[in-house]
Amino acid sequence: MPSLADLLPGQQAVVTDIEGDDAITTRLYEMGLIPGCRARFLGAAPLGDPLEFEIRHYRLSLRKDEARRVGVTLD
């Protein structure tokens, strides 16, 4: 299954699930990454980490390892 880390710049997806059961998973839910929400990949920092997404009309930066936990379906 693709994850947020697999998106190309400008590509949109719908969050399907978040892997794990720890503090990072909880924090991702608290930041608004819940199943059904849309995410658009805006770009990456010059060295490729962190990644920036638009979610619920705000910008969210995630490390690649965090973005890999978020399963998506392509829009």
Image (tube, rainbow, N blue to C red):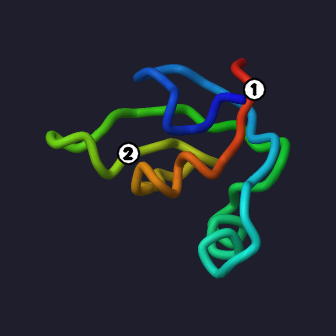
Quadrant in which residue 73 is drawn: top right
Quadrant in which residue 13 is drawn: top right
Residue 8 is situated, as x and y percent measured from the top left of the image, at: 45, 21
Residue 38 is situated, as x and y percent measured from the top left of the image, at: 70, 37
Mark on residue 51? 2
Q: Amino acid at mark 1?
A: Thr
Graded by Cα atoms within 10 Å as few (under 14), some (14 to 19) or many (20 or more), the crowding at tag 2 reads: many
Which residue appears at 15% of the width and 40% of the height?
Answer: 46
Real-space Cα distance between discs 1 and 2? 18 Å
Residue closest to the eye, 58 or 60: 60
Residue 67 in the figure: left or right of residue 38:
left
Residue closest to the eye, 37 or 69: 69
Which residue appears at 52% of the width and 42% of the height?
Answer: 54
Residue designated by label 1: 73
Q: Amino acid at mark 2?
A: Leu
Graded by Cα atoms within 10 Å as few (under 14), some (14 to 19) or many (20 or more), the crowding at tag 1 reads: some
- Check the image and report above or below for 11 versus 63: above
Residue 48 in the figure: left or right of residue 42:
left
- Check the image and report above or below for 2 versus 57: above
Residue 64 is situated, as x and y percent measured from the top left of the image, at: 42, 49
Residue farthest toward the bottom in the current orientation of the protein: 23
Element marked by disc 2: strand
Sequence-wise first label, 1 or 2: 2
